[in-house]
Amino acid sequence: MGTPQQATFAELVADALGCERRLEKDIDPLGDGQRYTLLCRNIATHIQALPELFVAETPAEVAAAIGRGQVVAMSVAGDYLRSQRRIALARPGRRLTPTFVPPDRVAAQLSALESEAAAFVATDGSGWEARALVAELALAVGAGLVEIAVPHIGSATTTPSSRRRPARPPGVKVEFNSASPFEDRKIRHHVQARRLVRKALASGSPLAVSCYANDVLIELLRDLGGLQEGGRLRIVYDDGSEGAGFDLGGLRGSPELGDAEDFAVSLMSMRHTEQDLDVDMAWFRNREVSVGDRRVSSETERWCREVSMSQFAELLAGGPVRMRMYPTGFAPAVVGFFQALRAVIACHPSKIEVRPLYFRGDGGCQGTPWP
């Protein structure tokens, strides 16, 4: 798979369609999912970089540009991403979003849009009409569609409130052993993820992280922080948005904290309520992180990073902290938290230690401590 500049548009599309066929056969879902996400991103990048791309403001301009044989773009405002998820449920296949629609599948795309017309018109009439119009025009001339998510303004940032734990009643305490946090299957995923990281760093391409379980992703980020060389790994999410990336190196083993306060957090509230009695607070409030389509994943990552930086500053003002953290599998929250933690460690290496604890029903495993 070359970069968008190295591969032709036809080659990118052919490669992506091949990935779809492999995904349907479940040959290598992790590797093919990574490749497919990057191919869809490269297809979108290729289209955006075309010098002859004409951005139309009205339906009449769309029709005129198509008549002139131009590649035409039209902004679709409103409830865009949510509509795409509804379509994904309504149509067959394992197509990711945002993505491309080849000419022979535009009719199915339009049919899916029409099947959801009542819901779309009720909540976002103008957005649905624009989507349907573009699909109809593409169908009429035998053209394909490329769907691109562009970051937009999200909701105002507010700092989540801390929540102290109630007194724990007598009961059986969950034990977290110090063995490997991975089952055999996840060991394979972790090894494969490290291989994909090396390829991404060598090529300058982003790594798609949304497909990883929380323990695989967190241990992978810890591995990156422990590298000797510097640099930054680019990160992309399954909605096509690219985050700030993750800096390599900078973690040199556990510091001597001395008399540190023990503190336990769950990464997000309302995800694993069975842990509530084991933690001092939920680091993020679910309703402020899981905001649906009001912001793309890269914006959620940034929000989580900024909130984490603020909360770390408040927490460390009282002295060194030894933190136990129970993570969730929501990748933007995981990446944002550990981006902030790495930055805090760089400034205050002897003031904080964070150990992830991977909860699994009646037991769990300890992760690698940061730093």
Image: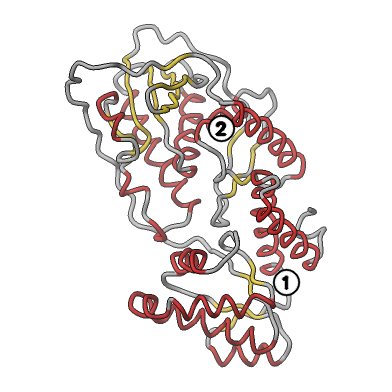
Residue type at mark 1 is: Leu
Disc on res. 68? none
Measured as percent of width and height from the top left, residue 210 is found at: 54, 46
Q: How is the image coloured?
A: secondary structure
Q: Amino acid at mark 2?
A: Val
Crowdedness near tag 1: few (<14), some (14–19) or many (≥20) residues, C-alpha within 10 Å: few
Residue 295 place in picture, x, y as percent: 43, 58
35 to the left or right of 165: right
Which element type, helix, strand or loop, lies under badge 1?
Answer: loop
Badge 2 density bin: few <14, some 14–19, many ≥20, Cα 10 Å: many
Q: Is residue 144 above or below residue 94?
A: below
Q: Please tell me which residue is depicted at 60% across the width and 63% down the height of the picture.
A: 93
Nearer to us in this view, 271 or 234: 271
Q: Earlier in the sequence, mark 1 or mark 2?
A: 1
In the image, which is nearer the foreground, mark 1 or mark 2? 2
Per the image, label 2 sits on a secondary structure element best described as: helix
Q: Which residue is mark 1?
A: 50
Tell whether 229 sits left or right of 339: right
Report how many numbered discs are placed on residues in the image: 2
Percent of width and height locating residue 14: 77, 64
Q: Are marks 1 and 2 in contact (CB under 8 Å)?
A: no
Q: Position of residue 212 (x, y in %)?
A: 56, 40
Q: Quadrant of residue 136?
A: bottom right
Q: 226 or 110, which lies in front?
A: 110
- For disc 2, the marked residue is 216
Residue at the spot 17% in from the left edge and 21% down from the top edge: 167
Above or below 316: residue 195: below
Question: What's the CA distance linking mark 1 and mark 2?
Answer: 37 Å
